Image: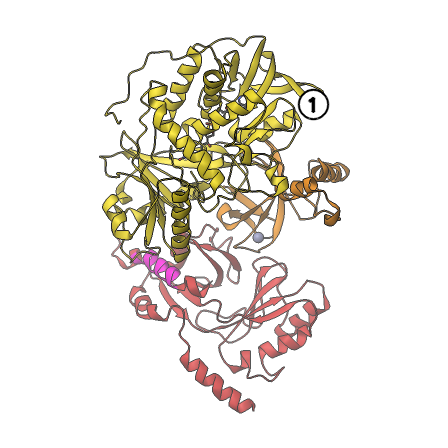
Chain colours: A orange, B red, C yellow
Amino acid sequence: MLLFSCPNCGPRDETEFHYGGQAHVPYPKDADALTDKEWSEFLFYRDNTRGDFAERWVHSTGCRQWFNMLRDTVSYEIKAVYPMGGSRPDQPPATAAQTQQKGQQS
Amino acid sequence: MAQTAERENDVIRGLRRSPAGHLADAFSQGSVSGEQGVTLREVPFLTMIGVRAAPGSAVWDRLGAVMGGLPERYGQVTGSGAGDGPGTEQGVSVLWLGPQEFLVIAADGPNALGGGAAGASLLGGLLDALAGDPGQVVDLSANRTTFELAGPSARAVLEKSCALDLHPREFTVGTAVNTQIGLIPAVLWKVDEAAFRIFPRASFADFLGRWLLDGMREYAAVEVP
Amino acid sequence: MTTEHLPEHPEFLWRNPDPKKSYDAVIVGGGGHGLATAYFLAKNHGMTNIAVLEKGWLAGGNMARNTTIIRSNYLWDESAAIYEHSLKLWEILPEELDYDFLFSQRGVMNLAHTLGDVRESMRRVGANKLNGVDAEWLDPQQVKELCPILNISDNIRYPVMGATYQPRAGIAKHDHVAWAFARKCDEMGVDIIQNCEVTGFLKDGNKVVGVKTNRGTINTEKVGLCAAGHSSVLAEMAGFRLPIQSHPLQALVSELHEQVHPTVVMSNHVHVYVSQAHKGELVMGAGVDSYNGYGQRGSFHVIEEQMAAAVELFPIFARAHVLRTWGGIVDTTLDASPIVGLSPVENMYVNCGWGTGGFKGTPGAGLTFAHTIATGAPHALNKPFSLERFETGALIDEHGAAAVAH
Ligand SMILES: Cc1cc2nc3c(=O)[nH]c(=O)nc-3n(C[C@H](O)[C@H](O)[C@H](O)COP(=O)(O)OP(=O)(O)OC[C@H]3O[C@@H](n4cnc5c(N)ncnc54)[C@H](O)[C@@H]3O)c2cc1C
Ligand SMILES: [Zn+2]
């Protein structure tokens, strides 16, 4: 059982949370303009990082708020908890924005 | 008009069945008195109003004014009923559920939900205060029921299946939080040194009631020295 | 063809060669799929100058961590075709590989607990019959006759309302399957190289020409990825992405018991499945842990919940003790179907996305993937399972048939 520190409620059992997958995946700016390939990337392709991974969680049976977490997918160690809309704490904001861009296009 | 509506409401009140009503006898039989005692009862039909408002907004201020302030942090309870001990539902309490989500709890009756006349009841007053601005005021009274678990062993019973740190140093009187007890999502409110109110959703009331009874059973047995 | 005892085998079933400078094809991953692919490359396509590279030890990944359920009662035509072909191969492989790996066709039951389940199950039985897959609908009494220890009374939260049953389905001994393939591969000249981790790829333009490993660089004409939970990591090394998320999947066994459980019982609704291994352990599993994970372990509440479900269905298990729990890394796709075919890199082929249910697909994956690698084009059976389906929208949604998967 993992122990998460909800930014609102403090440490709680993993069973109180739901997983939301990769963080920082923006909705395409102009979805109509995407090719099938780009649209499929948005729908079906997410990073599957082995190592530090930025992901979303929601505190379902607590404050019901979403937040971001940086977690090592091998050791499961939680490196950081940070608010929705915030940028990855292990990257300067500019790089984080580029990652989003790349995620969208590659 | 208002009188007819009120009479209809009385009729409806008489027809209500509380989610754990069928367990009332089991609760009283399972309750234990004495030094390691613990009692369980259902407090049926409390008025519950769901409120949503963004802190700092004008709506927040107006809604707060109706109830003596909205809670601003995790665990906080505000309102005139915040100090109510076990067995009393006099005032109006507002529980923090999230940064923008609150649960208003008041006694059952026309003063809370009213017979239709806006402003005359708690619900009407809150709706008036909302005035159609972004936010929410919804009657959720049928959503949850209320359990009261009290007595010297109440905390020990809860600790069997609630992972929170319930030590009085950490979990002080007047704290309410949304969490899990057993597998059941529930709001837990410590109303007194040895008394908790637990608010499970109606459909989980039977399970949670029996679950707590089971946890209480050992305190009825003679302590083995 | 069941034997009471496990077969005797010699101390070494395969050589432990050092990697050569170059091969005609290199398979990454020495699990069941990598080994089966190498086997069919050698047997069906005469490609014997090939190597299977395994970063750990043979079958140390999901291959020897799975719960060995083999069945083919999937809903859609495409799935029924490949899984049924696979099942037919299971039926002949013990003889073909000359290895009794205890393939036991004791049947698999998928319980229905709600009206929705019943409708879905009956629909699947109908679809299976149309596809030549043996399938039956059982009422609760028939369920009880087949599996007397199941609680079919209606005083439980989710009473058993019936079940689908595939008599030809069953279980096998997973590590022996891997050894059986490995021995035959080795006999045909395939190099099985353990402790050899692929760390990168050599490319000429968009064409793969070699692999970098912790034991040196190996040139090769073709690369087949069979890395299961690590598929995304390898794809990233090669410069492309896969629509895959890797999750922990756990299982557990009890201590040994008399044979009490004659078949395999799965329940999507209360979320557990149980069989009894030849030695006598009760083998149980359920769904994945929710989060992405490469840790080969998951959270305790997941196994706690599946045990609670098992005890509800099989009251007799209440006093059994857990002997061991473990986890693997499963490569899940959004339509719960695998990806077997070409990749965006020339001469590189992908076999992945089998997620929680790829053991049963081992021979089918091996056969079709070998065909794909050898000819450069998919076999009819794996054609629908291409990477392009996520773009064309021709998804093969098997969540219904594979919800507790396996
Ligand atoms: C607990 C559990 C229960 C399951 N139950 C069932 C079931 O009942 N029925 C069923 O059909 N399926 C089941 N599955 C799924 C099944 O085990 C997998 O789908 C299947 O084993 C995957 O194919 P594989 O055997 O080739 O994978 P693996 O055995 O995981 O092989 C992949 C190999 O690639 C190697 N590798 C990874 N990266 C590299 C690298 N860089 N270089 C070299 N080698 C590398 C790994 O070390 C690993 O050995 C279960 C899985 C788990 C975890
Ligand atoms: Zn929270």
Query: Residue at 52% across / 20% down in the picture?
Result: C55
Q: Position of residue B36 (x, y in %)?
A: 33, 59
Judge left or right: residue C211 versus residue A100: left
Instruction: Measuring from the top left, give residue B123's x and y in whole percent.
Output: 59, 76
Q: Is residue C134 above or below residue B133?
A: above
Q: Residue at x 28, y 43 (%)?
A: C317
Region in magenta: B206-217
Tell me if residue C193 is in the magenta stretch.
Answer: no
Tell me the quadrant of the picture where the N terminus of chain B can be found: bottom right
Q: Local crowd at mark 1 within 10 Å, few (<14), some, or many (≥20)?
A: some
Q: Is residue B214 magenta?
A: yes
Residue C37: percent from left, percent from top: 48, 22
Residue C24 visible at all: yes
Query: Residue at coordinates 48% horizontally, 74% vertically from top-left?
Result: B89
Amino acid marked by disc 1: Asn
Left-right relation of C119 to B64: left
- Output the chain of dot 1: C
Magenta stretch: dominant secondary structure: helix
Position of B93 relative to C406 (above/below): below
- Asked if the beta carbon under badge 1 is closer than 8 A to the nearest atom of ligand 1, the reply is no
Q: How many marks?
A: 1
Nearest the eye: B12 or C388: C388
Furthest-right residue in this view = A94
The residue wearing badge 1 is C206
Q: Where on the picture, by quarter, is residue C241?
A: top right
Q: Secondary structure at mark 1?
A: loop
